[in-house]
Amino acid sequence: MNNITTKPLNQNNMERIFRLEFNEQQQVFHKDDYTHEQNTYGWFTIFEFCTNLEFVIYKSYVNRIKKDKLTKNYLLQCAVEVKSFMINLLEYNISISQNKTPTDGK
């Protein structure tokens, strides 16, 4: 399964775009600013083009099921599902936005 290479769906010209990578051994995500060689040193690309909002949506989806260890196959499958979900929302003219300040639940 290849990484997702489509442009971000919620393109705001002011929003920073990065390549989202993950290291299975270290179990950490990395927002690459395109200054590092792709898919090296144990890192693999999940999204070629990603925004902070898309990362939050993706990470929330990934974490819906608690796992002891995240695997490449699981993360890439989640990427396909999240991208498909976001495309479906756009077809219904629905967008997701992120509050700039955290809420306190009130």
Image: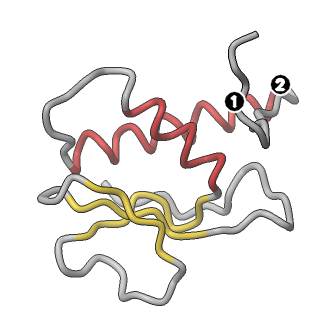
**What's the distance in space between the residues labelled 1 and 2, CA to CA?**
7 Å
Residue at the top extreme of this rendering: 106
- Are the residues flagged by discs 1 and 2 in contact, CB closer than 8 Å? yes
Density class for disc 1 (Cα within 10 Å; few <14, some 14-19, many ≥20) is few
* In the rendered image, the vertical position of residue 44 relative to residue 95, given as above or below: below
Q: Residue at point 17% right, 71% down?
A: 42
State the residue position of label 1.
88
Hey, which quadrant is residue 17 in on the image? bottom right
Q: Residue at point 37% right, 29% down?
A: 63
Nearest to the observer: residue 55 or residue 2: 55
Q: Position of residue 71 (x, y in %)?
A: 18, 45
Which mark identifies residue 27?
none
Image quarter of the C terminus: top right
Residue type (three-letter) at the residue carrying disc 1: Asn
Residue type (three-letter) at the residue carrying disc 2: Tyr
Q: Position of residue 82 (x, y in %)?
A: 52, 36
State the residue position of label 2.
92
